[in-house]
Image: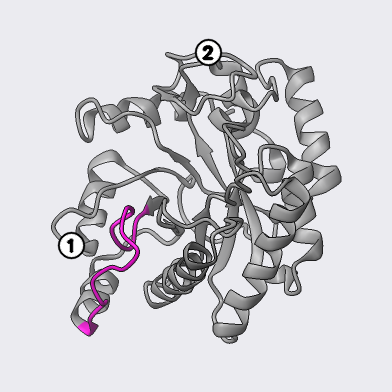
Amino acid sequence: MARFAFSDAPGDLIGAHLSTKGGLHTVFERATAINATALAMFAKNSNQWKGKTLTADDIRMFSEKRHVRPIVTHASYLINLATTNPEFHAKSIAAMIDELDRAEQLDAYGVVLHPGAHLGAGADAGLDQIARSLDRIHAALPAHRAVTLLETAAGQGTCLGCTFEELGRVMSIVDDKSRVGICIDTCHIFAAGYDIRTRDGYDRAMDEMEKHVGAENVGAFHINDSKKGVGSRVDRHEHIGKGELGLDAFAFVLNDPRFLRIPKLIETPKTVENVSDRKNLKLLRSLLQ
């Protein structure tokens, strides 16, 4: 069984990335509105280096309103642990320390992180720098339990993590492997060239994942359809069943016994808040066998 499996959590562990507008605790009202049994959220503004300090009241209200156990936060989009810019790198490390600390205070089990872009330094140098950066981050938070979940990338530009081999490389050379896992985004792996629309294609992709990462290290899924075709290297999410992936791909993921108790979270367009999420989650649940 995957080390991140929530074997005793109620429900099917299907949910969405939800807004915290009005305060972090309001995420649970939105979770109720869409019948989410797991959720993702930002613990601070996603486009700023620093966020408001979490107060004791913030944490208390979050805890009191909480009725969903599996929660992951998503790190700021600004963070790039593979950057070649020393000042930017120092800011990225400090920001990721803050993200993990916020997750710990909110009792979220992990922080989803885009691995980063090497900006011309080359994949090997970039992957090594990500691992060494994570070592520094872990050393600054020696007692924290919240883990970093490296998200599969779509392959745009010099972004790293668009193959399971690259993610596995980081995990194999980071010092404390217990503090790192991965988050598989269905849109991203499809855009990166993993054609999971057929049983054979899905099995080949998961065989590669097993070889380089291991199913036990999968901590979450982002369940998104793709506006663009396989191998497009373009990250554009679409409503479930309205993009290029088709429904079979989602059925393969949802019914894969290796991942039954792993949270699966949509990041699909919110054309109408709550309504869109409810429709997408209802369709996904109809695929459960």
Q: In the rendered view, would you say 235 is above or below 56?
A: above
Q: Secondary structure at mark 1?
A: loop
* Main secondary structure of the magenta stretch: loop
| Frontmost residue, 158 versus 59 | 158
From this viewpoint, which residue is outermost toward the right? Answer: 211
Q: CA distance from mark 2 to mark 1?
A: 36 Å
Residue 42 is inside the magenta segment: yes
| Frontmost residue, 117 versus 220 | 117
Q: Residue at x 52, y 48 (%)?
A: 263
* Residue receiving disc 2: 244
Q: In the rendered view, would you say 252 is above or below 216?
A: above
Q: Residue at x 29, y 73 (%)?
A: 63
Q: Position of residue 65 (x, y in %)?
A: 23, 66
Q: Residues within 10 Å of mark 2 (few under 14, many from 20)?
A: some
Label disc, if present, on residue 69 of the rendered structure: none
The amino acid type found where label 2 is placed reads Glu
Give the quadrant of the C terminus: top right
Residue 70 is inside the magenta segment: no
* Residue receiving disc 1: 23
Q: Secondary structure at mark 2?
A: loop
Q: Position of residue 64 (x, y in %)?
A: 24, 72
Which region is colored magenta?
41-56
Q: In the rendered view, would you say 110 is above or below 264?
A: below
Quarter-of-image position of residue 163: top right
Q: Residues within 10 Å of mark 1 (few under 14, many from 20)?
A: few
Mark closest to the chain's N terminus, 2 or 1:
1
Q: Position of residue 253 (x, y in %)?
A: 62, 32
Q: Residue at x 62, y 39 (%)?
A: 158
Q: How many marks?
A: 2
The amino acid type found where label 1 is placed reads Gly
| Frontmost residue, 229 versus 217 | 229
Q: Position of residue 42 (x, y in %)?
A: 34, 56
